[in-house]
Amino acid sequence: MSVELNHTIVHARDNRESAEFFAKLLGLEITSEWGPFIAVGLSNGVTLDFATIPQDSITPPQHYAFLVSEEDFDAAYARIRQRGIEHNDGGRGVYFMDPAGHAMELITVPYGGWTS
């Protein structure tokens, strides 16, 4: 059986604000818009589909971790620092919050190290 993640919906206070924040921070593109969704494409074909939720809705913060190259990490980390985004920094990984309050993480090696 072959199972791959195709997309996930990321709830946001403002789908455009969150999609543009994420895309610009990581040098990605908004790949499509339809209905309530604004999709940002990742290099492995997965999309993050940002959707605005009603203002009175309570959605618990989620956590999304992204495996990136050393070069992409350096570029994104420089953007995080330039924008003054509050973040935790340790080694070659960084946590930061998106506009909707979700915890985002960039890492250069998966937890547990590379396996062959």
Image (tube, rainbow, N blue to C red):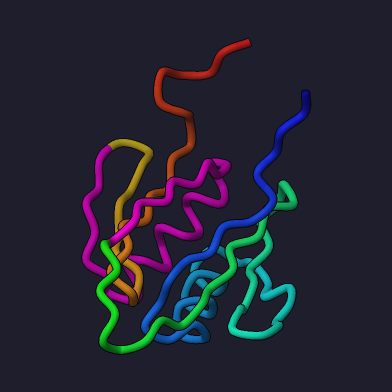
Above or below 58: residue 71: above
Q: Give the image location of residue 91, x and y in percent.
A: 30, 36
Q: The C terminus appears in which quarter of the rendering?
A: top right
Above or below 8: residue 82: below
Is 64 part of what is drawn in magenta? Answer: yes
Q: Give the image location of residue 82, x and y in percent.
A: 35, 73
All told, the count of numbered labels is 0
Quadrant assignment, res 59: bottom left
Is 55 part of what is drawn in magenta? Answer: no
Q: The N terminus appears in which quarter of the rendering?
A: top right
Quadrant assignment, res 86: bottom left
* Residue in the picture at 31% in, 57% down: 103
Residue placed most toward the observer, 49 or 22: 49
* Residue in the picture at 41% in, 77% down: 12
* Residue in the picture at 63% in, 68% down: 40
Magenta stretch: give its range: 61-90
Quadrant assignment, res 99: bottom left
Above or below 116: residue 23: below
Q: Give the image location of residue 63, x and y in percent.
A: 35, 51
